[in-house]
């Protein structure tokens, strides 16, 4: 804890120093520091409780080129300082035009809406949905056995098509190729994960999404005793809808896929209301079945959340979750977390 505290203060000092120098040196306008810190306390009906540090991140980013003629070239480097320090983001992103861009490095996987479109400082709940935690490599409970904060190392093409009269684009696409074996790692199995996502915006604040991913390439010999071809299939497919208006939001997704011979499926639905800029209230239902070919593998979570943001850089969240996991008694979990951003 002492080392982490010292590191955070040093990182904050560097960020503030960069901001101050930007006023004196013109080239510093290409370097924008940012960061945030999230910590909290949780407890359940059995009084099992703990203080925790969820995230402590600092990043540098900026736009190196920004013009109508040459497009926009931007970069980002972000480090996680809590728990197990590591680099989580490092990428270059070149938007040639509205219709086409290319991104290379380590960044969020476009699989699912919540993973790529809802960063921690904007997520309505303290924890991500079960679908994201178990299908998109967000946490240690992911079915693949890989925990990579929802990120991968690879290459992505993206763009927006068919501009409407109010300025928004009707179609958005992402096509990406990743190593598929976690962050900060070279490819170790000669396979690549190919991801495709398509979003359609009938309204500026409303879109529908569909996505698919599959590992392509030679089979790994990690488990040679399994001769069933299904053992080697790794895929995910699904879709969802997201409405994010001025006062209310609604988001729901469904995803299914195969991992090591098992088929799993999950879904969630969340809705809420924003009272001005300070208060937000939300409800969420989570469903996940880790093996659809057998009984007794279903999780049901029911959550309620309230958040208070009195100023832009500070947010306090309170979540209640009723967890029904297979094989154990239901859990009533209360979670309180504060977020401070730079």
Image (spheres, rainbow, N blue to C red):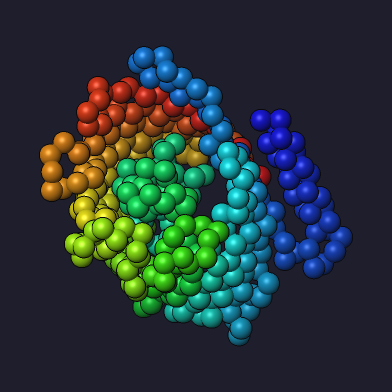
Q: Is residue 29 above or below residue 124?
A: below
In the foreground, 185 or 90: 185
Q: How many marks?
A: 0
In the foreground, 297 or 172: 297
Point 58% across, 79% down: residue = 71
Residue 174 position in % (x across, y down): 39, 70
Q: Residue furthest bottom?
A: 69
Q: Residue furthest right?
A: 24
Q: Is residue 73 above or below residue 210?
A: below
Q: Is residue 115 left or right of residue 313?
A: left
Image quarter where the C terminus lies is top right
In the foreground, 270 or 288: 288
Q: Residue furthest front?
A: 225
Q: Is residue 304 left or right of residue 55?
A: left
- Residue 249 seen: no
Q: Is residue 113 left or right of residue 53?
A: left
Residue 310 position in % (x across, y down): 57, 33
Point 38% across, 49% down: residue = 145
- Residue 72 seen: yes
Image quarter where the N terminus lies is top right
In the foreground, 170 or 128: 128
Point 19% across, 62% down: residue = 228
Residue 152 position in % (x across, y down): 47, 61
Residue 153 position in % (x across, y down): 50, 64
Point 44% across, 49% down: residue = 147
């Amino acid at each position: 804890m002492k080392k982490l505290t010292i590191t955070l203060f040093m990182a904050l000092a560097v960020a503030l120093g960069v901001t101050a120098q930007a006023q004196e040196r013109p080239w510093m306008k290409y370097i924008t520091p940012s960061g945030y810190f999230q910590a909290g306390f949780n407890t359940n009906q059995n009084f099992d409780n703990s203080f925790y540090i969820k995230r402590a991140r600092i990043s540098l980013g900026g736009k190196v080129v920004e013009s109508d003629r040459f497009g926009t070239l931007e970069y980002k480097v972000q480090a996680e300082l809590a728990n197990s320090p590591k680099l989580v983001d490092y990428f270059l992103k070149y938007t040639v035009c509205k219709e086409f861009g290319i991104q290379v490095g380590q960044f969020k996987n476009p699989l699912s809406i919540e993973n790529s479109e809802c960063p921690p400082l904007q997520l309505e709940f303290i924890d991500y949905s079960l679908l994201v935690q178990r299908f998109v490599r967000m946490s240690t409970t992911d079915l693949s056995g890989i925990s990579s904060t929802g990120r991968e190392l690879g290459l992505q093409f993206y763009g927006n098509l068919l501009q409407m009269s109010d300025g928004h684009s009707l179609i958005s696409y992402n096509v990406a190729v990743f190593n598929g074996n976690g962050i900060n790692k070279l490819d170790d199995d000669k396979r690549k994960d190919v991801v495709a996502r398509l979003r359609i915006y009938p309204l500026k604040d409303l879109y529908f999404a569909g996505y698919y991913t599959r590992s392509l390439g030679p089979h790994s010999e990690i488990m040679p005793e399994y001769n069933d071809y299904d053992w080697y299939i790794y895929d995910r497919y699904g879709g969802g809808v997201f409405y994010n208006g001025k006062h209310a939001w609604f988001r729901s997704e469904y995803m299914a896929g195969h991992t090591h011979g098992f088929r799993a499926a999950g879904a969630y639905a969340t809705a809420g209301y924003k009272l001005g800029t300070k208060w937000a209230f939300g409800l969420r239902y989570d469903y996940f079945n880790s093996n659809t070919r057998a009984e007794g593998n279903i999780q049901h979570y029911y959550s309620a959340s309230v958040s208070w943001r009195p100023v832009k850089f500070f947010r306090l969240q309170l979540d209640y979750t009723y967890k029904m996991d297979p094989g154990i008694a239901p859990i009533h979990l209360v979670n309180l977390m504060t977020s401070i951003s730079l």
